[in-house]
């Protein structure tokens, strides 16, 4: 018996009409319209500005370079998804009894879904690709924010060191003056000794800040995929604070887009699980030849052809458990998306309030407190040179001025950290600088 199987017209019509889903099935070209850039060669230039830190992280960070390969994995799965099962071909022969009776058989069969299960599988795989892209973009956002915070820490340490070095220069001048005056007997030698001790303390503090900068710079190099021994110089300085006022667009946050896509994927999985209630139909066309003895005429050759179909009956397993699980998953993702929207708005508002607070403190220190402290120090220095004030009073005034300037640097640093958090919260960390 020769058997062959082909797609039948009736099952094809059933497959196209029996199960319709309200969600549009995106085609493969849509996925190809949003490609992820292939890995590029590392950017190892030794000098970088704060405004370029985000770009360097996107290009160089080892975790991001590896994560992009996950996109290629998802693209491969998208190509594979939704393909029908391969057809089967069978061949056979047999001999009956001791005479010349024999038969020859062949078969060609194909499984055919009666629902749009294959299209749903393709759609779910498409959403998985889009989820991988959104996840990668959210990882980029977080790594950019962390690297920019690292760079801000370096610039703040540099500003503190510069202020201490300025104070060291001023104090060195006073040490020379007091030492000369002590030799002439005009001032106490104890004041000269005290001045040298204070100078040593400031130099030690400056050295500590320089050591901290080297450690922070090594961590920044790691974010750029650079060796610790590689040369790297961070350019620029902390800019004065300014007001923040950007409109919140939730779709700019990759993690929120991830939840939106995940919600669509969850709804598609419900449809897919419902489609799996009905198994695939197997269709075939049969034909064959057989030689058998037909007494009293002897051996005769007979031919046969026919069409067959096998339809599974969903009597015991209607995939109820998986459907219920998919529905619960879709509801959970929807609630998670709503919760994330609340969290994002809270993050934006909190960062903005914090930035405005530090900006106010910076302005108060700059416009009022530091000028008063500087003026007081200058007056005491004049009095000391004229023999009208003691060195201890001047030392306390200089220390107060240095403390206020250090507070201003800290306020400026905290403002920029809050600014960095703010732009990351609205989904645009690279726009912060």
Image (tube, grey):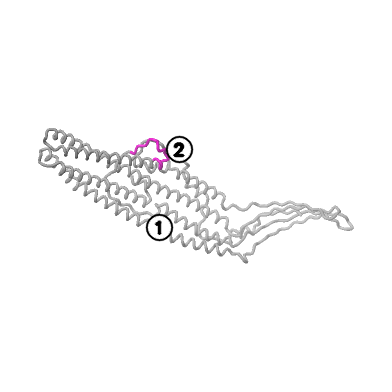
Q: Is residue 183 above or below residue 33?
A: above
Q: Position of residue 402 (x, y in %)?
A: 22, 44
Look at 14% across and 35% down and name the residue there.
182
Q: Majority secondary structure of the magenta segment?
A: loop
> Which residue is the site of mark 2?
41
Marks 1/2 in contact by CB < 8 Å: the verdict is no
Mark earlier in primary sequence (1, 2): 2
358 in relation to 324, above or below: above
Q: Nearer the viewer, residue 99 or 200?
A: 200
Left/right of residue 114 with respect to residue 180 in the rendered view: right
Between the C-alphas of marks 1 and 2, the distance is: 36 Å
- Camera-side residue of 297 and 72: 72
> Residue 340 — which label?
1
| Left or right: residue 138 compared with residue 118 | left
Number of numbered discs on residues? 2
Look at 88% across and 56% down and name the residue there: 297
Which residue is drawn at the image coordinates 64% and 64% (left, top)?
313
- Which dot marks residue 239? none
Near-viewer residue (209 or 5)? 209
Q: Is residue 333 left or right of residue 307?
A: left
Q: Residue furthest bottom?
A: 315
Residue placed most toward the observer, 24 or 50: 50
> Magenta span has 223?
yes
**Label 2 Cα neighbours within 10 Å, binned few <14 / some 14-19 / many ≥20:** few
Query: Which residues are drawn in magenta?
Result: 221-234
Residue 385 is inside the magenta segment: no
């Amino acid at each position: 018996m020769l058997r062959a199987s082909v797609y039948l017209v009736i099952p094809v019509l059933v497959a196209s009409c029996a199960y319709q889903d309200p969600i549009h099935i995106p085609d493969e070209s849509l996925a190809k319209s949003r490609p992820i850039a292939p890995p590029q060669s590392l950017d190892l230039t030794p000098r970088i500005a704060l405004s370029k830190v985000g770009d360097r992280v996107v290009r160089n960070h080892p975790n991001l370079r590896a994560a992009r390969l996950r996109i290629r994995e998802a693209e491969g799965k998208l190509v594979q998804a939704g393909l029908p099962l391969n057809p089967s071909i069978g061949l056979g022969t047999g001999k009956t009894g001791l005479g010349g009776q024999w038969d020859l058989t062949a078969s060609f069969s194909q499984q055919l879904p009666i629902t749009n299960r294959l299209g749903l599988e393709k759609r779910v795989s498409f959403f998985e690709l889009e989820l991988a892209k959104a996840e990668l973009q959210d990882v980029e956002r977080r790594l950019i924010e962390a690297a920019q915070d690292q760079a801000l820490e370096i610039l703040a340490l540099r500003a503190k060191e510069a202020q201490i070095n300025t104070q060291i220069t001023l104090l060195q001048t006073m040490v020379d003056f007091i030492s000369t005056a002590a030799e002439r007997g005009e001032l106490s030698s104890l004041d000269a000794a005290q001045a040298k001790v204070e100078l040593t303390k400031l130099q030690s503090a400056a050295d500590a800040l320089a050591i901290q900068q080297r450690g922070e710079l090594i961590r920044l190099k790691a974010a750029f995929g650079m060796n610790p021994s590689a040369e790297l110089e961070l350019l620029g300085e902390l800019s004065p604070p300014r007001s923040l006022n950007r409109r919140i667009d939730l779709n700019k946050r990759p993690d929120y887009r991830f939840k939106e896509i995940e919600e669509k994927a969850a709804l598609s999985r419900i449809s897919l699980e419902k489609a799996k209630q009905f198994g695939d139909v197997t269709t075939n066309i049969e034909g064959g030849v057989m030689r058998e003895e037909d007494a009293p005429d002897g051996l005769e050759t007979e031919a046969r052809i026919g069409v067959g179909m096998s339809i599974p009956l969903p009597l015991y397993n209607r995939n109820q458990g998986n459907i219920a699980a998919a529905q619960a998953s879709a509801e959970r993702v929807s609630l998670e998306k709503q919760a994330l929207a609340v969290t994002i708005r809270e993050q934006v508002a909190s960062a903005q309030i914090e930035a405005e607070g530090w900006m106010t403190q910076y302005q108060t220190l700059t416009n009022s407190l530091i000028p008063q402290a500087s003026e007081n120090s200058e007056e005491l220095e004049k009095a000391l040179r004229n023999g009208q004030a003691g060195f201890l009073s001047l030392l306390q005034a200089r220390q107060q001025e240095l403390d206020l300037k250090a507070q201003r640097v800290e306020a400026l640093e905290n403002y920029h950290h809050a600014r960095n958090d703010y732009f990351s919260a609205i989904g645009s960390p690279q726009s912060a600088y």
